[in-house]
Image (tube, rainbow, N blue to C red):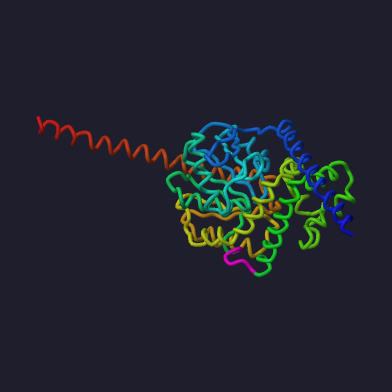
Amino acid sequence: MLAVLTWCFGIAIVGGLVGMVYQRLGTRRDAQVYPPPGRLVGLGSHRLHVLDAGYGSPTVVLEAGLMSTVLSWNNLRRNLAGSYRVVSYDRAGLGWSDLGPMPRTAERIVEELHAMLKRAAIPAPYVLVGHSFGGLTMPLFAARFPEDTAGVVLVDPVVPAEWNPPSEHDRKLTRIGAKVCRRAAILSRIGIIRFVAFLLTSGAKKPASYLVRLISRGTPANSGSVSSPWFSALPEDEKSMAAVFWVQPKFALTIASQLENLPTSAALLGELDKFCDKPVVILSAGDAPEHRRREHEAMARRLPHGEHLVAKESNHWIMQEEPELVIGAIEKVVRYSQRSQATSVVTSREQAATDRPAMQRIGKAAS
């Protein structure tokens, strides 16, 4: 019996070492085949990947959803870059960015985004565009840095009321999700998640499905399967890179922390009813749950320049289904910002013209 246990232990150790080598070689290959399309901006403890295109002011800053990257904005960014300077980035731990300090709260994410924009010499003011999870970060950015904010566009955003406090059902789901992510982080270090991705991309869906169900045991029906409707709804560019991004430990650790800290992030924003005194446009998906749409409407009403619109033909990914609505909302905020800047310039000139004779009189009196 002891000999059998020794053999099993030895095989497990060898298998783990082989898996670690497999993971390391795969990660090195991915870095060579899929280099970052943008630049890496250092924040001291880690680097954030930034994609910067176009020219003009104000700068449009795009914040992706919970698990998403710069790729989720590809089509919209191309459409906007001909008229504006457009910046998208990967939050720490996602896409091409390094793993960042924990915990991954909205507060930390906003501080990192602001520091990155300054270090990358990307000038304010910013039109802040947030999708889904970005509904917790972009309003907080506007509240923390009002002088840098030209306005906000929220695309089917998560709202504080959904997680402040969370229902017992949602609390259970986030707890399970975070647990599965931490399990995946351990398994990804020894190459198992990468191996599952290899099976999927090779067409071996049956064994891959079995392994996915095993890894994600405890999750609701269909969410832990290779045919998850949630995965199917992702933009094609995101799906095509899942086998590169989602097999890394940093991804699983980051998602686990973001999930665990949803109530904390929501509570922080929940204290700020009027987070922005500039234009804020909130877009709801046509298939958004009724309670979320009502919260979107209420949020817009509380703001001095809030507006709520429904993308009737869209699911959660409005920028894919009806990009013209998102672009129209951005253009509305930009026009307001440009009018405000022009008014400010005129006011400054009028004030200077008024002050000049007075200064001249003071000068003559002094002489």
Q: Is residue 166 magenta?
A: yes
Q: Give me the residue at 41% from left, 38% from top.
A: 342
Depth order, front residue of 16/364: 16
Q: Give me the residue at 87% from left, 58% from top.
A: 2
The C terminus - image quarter: top left
Q: Give me the residue at 51% from left, 39% from top.
A: 117
Query: Going by the image, does 348 lie left or right of 228?
Result: left
Q: Which residues are magenta?
A: 162-167
Horizontal and vertical percent for residue 99?
A: 62, 44
Q: Quadrant of residue 29?
A: top right
Predominant secondary structure in magenta? loop
Horizontal and vertical percent for residue 50?
A: 59, 37
Q: How many marks?
A: 0
Horizontal and vertical percent for residue 268?
A: 51, 59
Horizontal and vertical percent for residue 259?
A: 64, 57
Query: Going by the image, does 139 lie left or right of 69?
Result: left
The N terminus - image quarter: bottom right
Query: Going by the image, does 326 lie left or right of 14?
Result: left
Depth order, front residue of 62/66: 66
Q: Is residue 71 magenta?
A: no
Examine the rendered structure and indicate whether residue 28 appears above or below residue 106: above
Examine the rendered structure and indicate whether residue 288 appears above or below residue 12: below
Depth order, front residue of 56/107: 107
Query: Going by the image, does 145 lie left or right of 106?
Result: left
Considering every residue shown, the one lying at the far front of the view is 2
